[in-house]
Image (cartoon, rainbow, N blue to C red):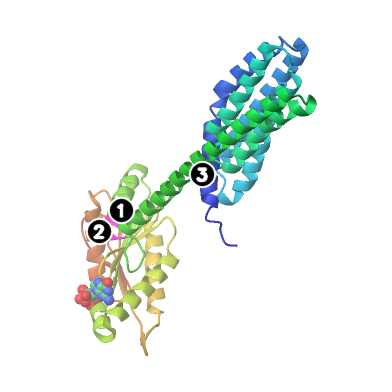
């Protein structure tokens, strides 16, 4: 299914709509109580109290729906479903208020006319200023006040009522126009913000990734490694570091060209990535040298993984043009110890083990003992 590119924008609009309307939790109950008390001036107290009770329940319900929406953090694909739920919940509130115009109107009473007008002006202006974010919800929120405007001339078709209704409709049309303009500006701002966030994510990824292989680069690797070493000191959980270096890579470049060498690097990285856990930190130190930091990993596990990596790489047969390249790697393994004051200390010991692997004939794993002294422990292929 092709994702609708506008869905993310519409979801952000829905968030904005809900955020703005969440202020209702302070304002709407107060306005409802005042309106309920005023109502009792023209309708029996029991009616006024019934309206007040229903409206308070409606407010509590739509605020609950808003909270559920915020907690759910739905993906853009669920925007329409949530927009419908919110429209129903808030629509009930708009209907309850707009209905006042019909059943609470007492023609001929100037005070009542003022009251009904104030309710209308409030509904329409608040709708435009608070619902502009989401165009569909803006239109739905405007619908009940418009229906309430049409009702009086239908109930009592006099020139006065028709005139009042026409004036109100013109006012609604004007407000809708304003609402659409604010909506267009809001949508543009949301689109720009989303594009900005996307660009920042891409830049951050580019700054932390190696362009050729896609794994994290030296800078990010060192930062993460220092953080993991710090965590190891606090938690006491074992931390292992592997230095992985391709053997005779200069020869590969010389024989198959730089592009051939690049293909080998990518194939080796892809193989390694498949064998490491998501919590492991695998990155390129530079050239044909890589590091793998393994949090919460015992020595035996680290050594076995190094061996699995070595075997998997040795089994590769990479086709470059008409030739087949069979790369191998030398791996140095070191466990973090109290002697490792900084990440560089740990790296140095893993590096020395890796050089021992090279000196021992390459395509092998050598483990450095914990602590500062370096006594290589070869793990032969
Ligand atoms: N294709 C390619 N080559 C690279 C890249 N980065 C570094 N190199 C080459 O990798 C080679 C590394 O050579 P050396 O450091 O001599 O190591 P080696 O030939 O692998 O020898 P040993 O490590 O001792 O087995 C150099 O020729 C670099 O130019 C790269 O991104 N792509």
Gap in Å between the C-alphas at discs 3 and 2? 45 Å
Q: Which residue is mark 1?
A: 225
Camera-side residue of 200 and 317: 200
Range of residues picked out in magenta:
217-221
Say what secondary structure mark 1 lies in.
helix
1 or 2: mark nearer the eye: 1
Image quarter hosting the C terminus: bottom left
* Left-right relation of 26 to 94: left
Q: Secondary structure at mark 2?
A: helix
Residue 12, disc: 3
Residue 44: x and y in percent read 77, 11
Q: Position of residue 222 (x, y in %)?
A: 27, 55
**In the rendered structure, are the residues bearing label 1 and label 2 in contact, judged by CB atoms less than 8 Å apart?**
yes
In the rendered image, the vertical position of residue 287 relative to residue 77, given as above or below: below
Confirm whether residue 64 shows in the render: no
How far is mark 1 from mark 3, CA to CA? 36 Å
* Quarter of the displayed picture in which ligand 1 can be seen: bottom left
Q: Nearer the viewer, residue 35 or 256?
A: 35
């Amino acid at each position: 299914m092709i994702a609708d590119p506008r869905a993310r924008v519409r979801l952000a609009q829905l968030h904005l709509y809900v955020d703005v309307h969440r202020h209702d939790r302070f304002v709407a109950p107060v306005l409802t109580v005042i309106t309920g008390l005023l109502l009792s001036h023209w309708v029996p107290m029991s009616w006024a109290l019934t309206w007040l009770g229903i409206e308070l329940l409606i407010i509590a319900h739509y605020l609950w729906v808003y909270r559920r929406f915020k907690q759910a953090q739905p993906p853009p694909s669920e925007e329409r479903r949530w927009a419908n739920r919110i429209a129903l919940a808030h629509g009930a509130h708009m209907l309850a208020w707009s209905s006042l115009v019909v059943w609470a109107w007492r023609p001929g009473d100037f005070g009542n006319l003022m009251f009904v007008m104030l309710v209308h002006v409030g509904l329409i202006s608040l709708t435009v200023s608070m619902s502009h974010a989401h165009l569909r919800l803006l239109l739905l929120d405007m619908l009940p006040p418009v229906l309430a405007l049409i009702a009086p001339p239908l109930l009592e078709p006099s020139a006065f009522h028709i005139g009042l209704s026409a004036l109100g409709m013109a006012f609604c049309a004007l407000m809708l126009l304003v609402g659409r303009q604010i909506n267009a500006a809001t949508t543009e701002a949301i689109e720009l913000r989303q594009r900005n966030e996307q660009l920042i994510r891409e830049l951050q990824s580019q700054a932390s990734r190696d362009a050729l292989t896609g794994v994290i680069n030296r800078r990010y690797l060192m930062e993460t490694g220092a953080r993991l070493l710090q965590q190891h000191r606090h938690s006491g959980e074992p931390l292992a570091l592997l230095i992985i270096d391709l053997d005779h890579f200069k020869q590969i470049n010389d024989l198959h060209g730089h592009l051939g060498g690049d293909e080998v690097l990518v194939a080796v990285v892809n193989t390694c990535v498949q064998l490491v856990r998501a919590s492991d930190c695998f990155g390129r130190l530079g050239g044909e040298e890589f590091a793998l930091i393994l949090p919460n990993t015992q020595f035996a596990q680290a050594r076995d993984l190094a061996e699995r990596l070595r075997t998997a790489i040795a089994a590769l047969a990479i086709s470059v043009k008409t030739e087949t390249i069979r790369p191998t790697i030398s791996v140095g393994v070191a466990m973090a110890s109290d002697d490792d004051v900084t990440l560089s200390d740990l790296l140095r010991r893993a590096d020395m083990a890796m050089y021992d692997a090279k000196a021992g004939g390459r395509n092998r794993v050598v483990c450095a003992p914990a602590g500062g002294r370096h006594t290589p422990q070869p793990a032969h292929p």
